[in-house]
Image (tube, coloured by chain):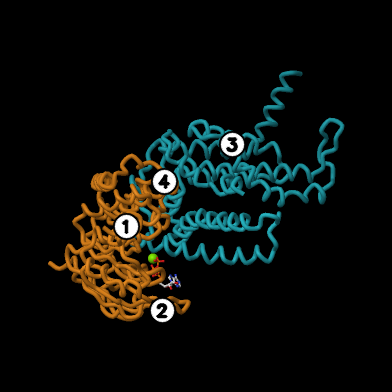
Chain colours: A orange, B cyan
């Protein structure tokens, strides 16, 4: 069984306006891996992720999820396998209540009512948002929205979780809780972010993207120690790996 | 600005009301949609000089507001915000149509004023019924009911997305105007040059966001229909609701009840 593999080959994409967001990207992610995708603003992270569940069709190259190359016919199966958490939770939550929003995916899968109820409550419990079930999503705080957005994806029981900037706009405590939550997941994880500290916490492997190309792909610890590489890609060492300027180098 | 944001654009309050539990809320969306439609047709079909005829129809919104436990003040607020449209449509009638039609004590009331009043009344009633429908049913359920009533899916999905995007659009708009007003402290009104550039940008932004929301929906298996959590089921109560109200509307349409009552009262008095 190879259905948790994600394979991207020579992927290129140009937006209608003419921005070349991806210029030949290739990598392979296997079952159970947690991979960080890092890069500056506009590097092409979000564009890359959108290809992973077929919301954007590649202009060149191919994407394979498990046994299927993504095509019109396999789209349905691929979207069951890949759970996508978008950069802005406001884009993701569109139903009148949290409960309905989390039920939206399972309902589209055509599951029986009792099973849907089960899945919704289980997903909300997992992210600690069961008490929000009847609230309208647009009235939640940033952290609550993020938790619910993740629940909407969990309720479809995906094998692969794709998260775009999951820690943006979170306060330190909410950020820490989210990191612990993600750590508890057994899924294959692909996380795009500028939050290198979070990537350091969660991902053993990191892919660096700069101007639509991969500039490095390897163990997170090694990449984050490569000062030149990070600088070239407009990134900085995670704070945790920098000498503390206040207490001074020990 | 924040006033307008909260008052005008917050249609979402209606959807929050739709979560309440009441006998009206529990009715099948199809029964409520059909009844509201019958109501609207009845209201619109009254002649333009008929001011008293439609009055008994007020019973419909009043009963639904009471049974559905809706806040009347909130609904009236929405009505008042929308009333300028009706004012614009009706305002010329008193000027154009000056023939005296009836007497109110010493006052000659012209046909124009009566038809103006009638337009306002009919507009108010129809809009109120629409607001009540959404507040007791929820917009998605209304669209679903329309689909089940054989309205083409292309239309109902468009309608549903449009409704969703109106929040998005107005939200973006409000944010942009706020950004402008924070920087243009001394200017009271927005110059038209800036207004048109903001409007253009607003459209692009809204399209972008709409596209992202659509992507998010597709990502979760959306295939053209938002499915209901509980399957729709038409029962005896639903049929009774729709039939009783429709019967009442027909009655009101063909018998001028206020006039009959008036005659009855004066008849007794004599
Ligand atoms: N809808 C779009 N239309 C046109 N160009 C776009 C669109 N979305 C992104 N781009 C462009 O494509 C490039 C890559 O954008 P992308 O959103 O993938 O970057 P990112 O790495 O996710 O950045 P960020 O860290 O800011 O989220 C950017 O130059 C951006 O301007
Ligand atoms: Mg991005």
Whichever of callouts 4 and 2 sits on the residue coming sooner in the sequence is: 2
Q: Residue A71: x percent and y percent?
A: 28, 73
Residue linked to disc 3:
B251
Query: Taking A6 as reference, is B246 left or right?
Result: right
Residue carrying label 1: A248
Are labels 4 and 2 assigned to the same chain?
yes
| Ligand 1 lies under 8 Å from the Cβ of mark 2 | no
Q: Secondary structure at mark 1?
A: loop
Q: Residue at x 43, y 33 (%)?
A: B23
Q: CA distance from mark 4 to mark 2?
A: 36 Å
Image quarter where ligand 1 lies? bottom left
Expressed as whole percent of the image width and height from the top left, the position of residue A220 reads 23, 66
- Report the label total: 4
Mark-to-mark CA distance, 3 and 2:
67 Å
Q: Which residue is mark 2?
A: A20
Q: Which of pointers 1 and 2 lies earlier in the amino acid sequence?
A: 2
Location of the C terminus of chain B by quadrant is top right
Which residue is at 62% across, 40% downward? Answer: B253
């Amino acid at each position: 069984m190879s259905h948790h593999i994600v394979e991207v080959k020579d992927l290129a994409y140009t937006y209608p306006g003419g921005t070349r967001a991806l210029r030949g990207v290739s990598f392979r992610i296997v079952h159970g891996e947690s991979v960080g995708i890092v890069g500056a603003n506009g590097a092409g992270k979000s564009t890359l992720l959108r290809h992973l569940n077929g919301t954007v069709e590649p202009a060149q190259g191919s994407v394979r999820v498990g046994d299927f190359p993504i095509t019109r016919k396999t789209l349905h199966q691929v979207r069951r396998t890949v759970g996508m958490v978008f950069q802005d939770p406001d884009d993701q939550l569109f139903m009148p209540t949290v409960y309905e929003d989390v039920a939206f995916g399972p309902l589209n899968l055509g599951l029986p009512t009792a099973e849907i109820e089960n899945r919704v409550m289980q997903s909300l419990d997992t992210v600690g948002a069961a008490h929000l079930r009847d609230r309208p999503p647009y009235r939640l705080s940033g952290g609550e929205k993020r938790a619910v957005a993740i629940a909407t994806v969990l309720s479809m029981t995906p094998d692969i979780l794709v998260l775009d900037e999951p820690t943006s706009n979170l306060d330190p405590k909410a950020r820490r809780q989210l990191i612990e939550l993600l750590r508890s997941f057994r899924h294959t994880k692909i996380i795009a972010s500028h939050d290198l500290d979070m990537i350091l916490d969660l991902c053993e492997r990191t892919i660096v993207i700069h101007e639509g190309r991969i500039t490095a792909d390897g163990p997170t610890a090694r990449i984050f120690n490569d000062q030149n590489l990070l600088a070239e890609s407009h990134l900085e060492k995670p704070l945790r790996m920098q000498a503390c300027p206040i207490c001074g180098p020990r | 600005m924040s006033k307008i944001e909260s008052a005008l654009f917050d249609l979402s309050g209606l959807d929050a009301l739709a979560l309440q539990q009441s006998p009206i809320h529990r009715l099948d969306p199809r029964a409520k949609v059909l009844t509201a439609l019958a109501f609207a047709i009845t209201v619109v079909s009254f002649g333009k000089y008929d001011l008293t005829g439609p009055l008994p129809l007020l019973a419909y919104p009043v009963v639904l507001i009471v049974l559905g436990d809706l806040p009347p003040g909130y609904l009236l607020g929405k009505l008042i915000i929308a009333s300028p449209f009706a004012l614009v449509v009706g305002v010329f009638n008193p000027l154009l149509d000056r023939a005296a039609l009836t007497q109110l004590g010493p006052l000659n009331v012209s046909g124009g004023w009566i038809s103006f009043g009638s337009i306002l009344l009919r507009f108010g009633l129809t809009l109120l019924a629409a607001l009540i429908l959404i507040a007791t049913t929820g917009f998605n359920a209304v669209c679903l009911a329309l689909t089940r009533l054989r309205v083409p899916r292309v239309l109902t999905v468009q309608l549903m997305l449009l409704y969703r995007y109106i929040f998005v659009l107005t939200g973006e708009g409000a944010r942009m105007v706020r950004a402008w007003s924070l920087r243009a402290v001394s200017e009271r009104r927005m110059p038209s040059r800036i207004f048109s550039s903001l409007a253009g940008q607003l459209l692009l932004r809204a399209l972008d966001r709409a596209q992202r929301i659509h992507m998010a929906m597709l990502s979760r298996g959306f295939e053209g229909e938002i499915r209901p959590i509980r399957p729709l089921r038409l029962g005896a109560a639903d049929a009774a609701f729709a039939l009783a109200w429709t019967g009442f509307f027909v009655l009101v349409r063909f018998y001028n009840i206020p006039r009959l009552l008036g005659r009855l009262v004066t008849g007794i008095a004599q």
